Amino acid sequence: MRAMVEVIAKALVDDPESVEVHEVEEAGDSILELSVAQPDLGKVIGKQGRTVRAMRTLLVATGAKASKRFVLEILE
């Protein structure tokens, strides 16, 4: 999952080297923390949050197959 989020984020931003994804296990859930360069933050979030919502939907769907819950957080 971490790799999938990283590939999607790198495709969206202007500075792909600044994309970092850290996975944190907490109470059986996997929290994916995504950080990008400040100017690229809006590109990852998208208009009205549509892009990040789509990424979260992919995580929920893929996590359902693995019987695991994934949460995507965007760090500033």
Image: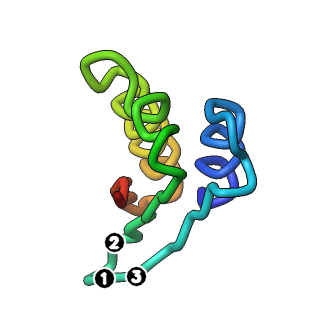
Of 64 and 7, the residue lying toward us: 7
Q: Position of residue 22 (x, y in %)?
A: 53, 72
**Where is the N terminus found, in terms of image quarters?**
bottom right
Dividing the picture into quadrants, the one containing residue 14 is top right
Numbered tag placed on residue 29 in the rendering:
2
76 in relation to 46, above or below: below
Residue bearing mark 3: 25
Numbered tag placed on residue 12 in the rendering:
none
Q: Is residue 37 left or right of residue 47?
A: right
Residue bearing mark 1: 26
Q: Are marks 2 and 1 in contact (CB under 8 Å)?
A: yes
Of 35 and 21, the residue lying toward us: 35
Q: Residue at x 62, y 30 (%)?
A: 12
Q: Are marks 2 and 3 in contact (CB under 8 Å)?
A: yes
Q: Position of residue 40 (x, y in %)?
A: 51, 38
7 in relation to 28, above or below: above
Of 64 and 33, the residue lying toward us: 33
Determine whether the residue tagged by mark 2 lies in a helix, strand or loop. strand
The amino acid beneath tag 1 is: Glu
70 in relation to 30, above or below: above
The amino acid beneath tag 3 is: Glu
Of 3 and 65, the residue lying toward us: 3
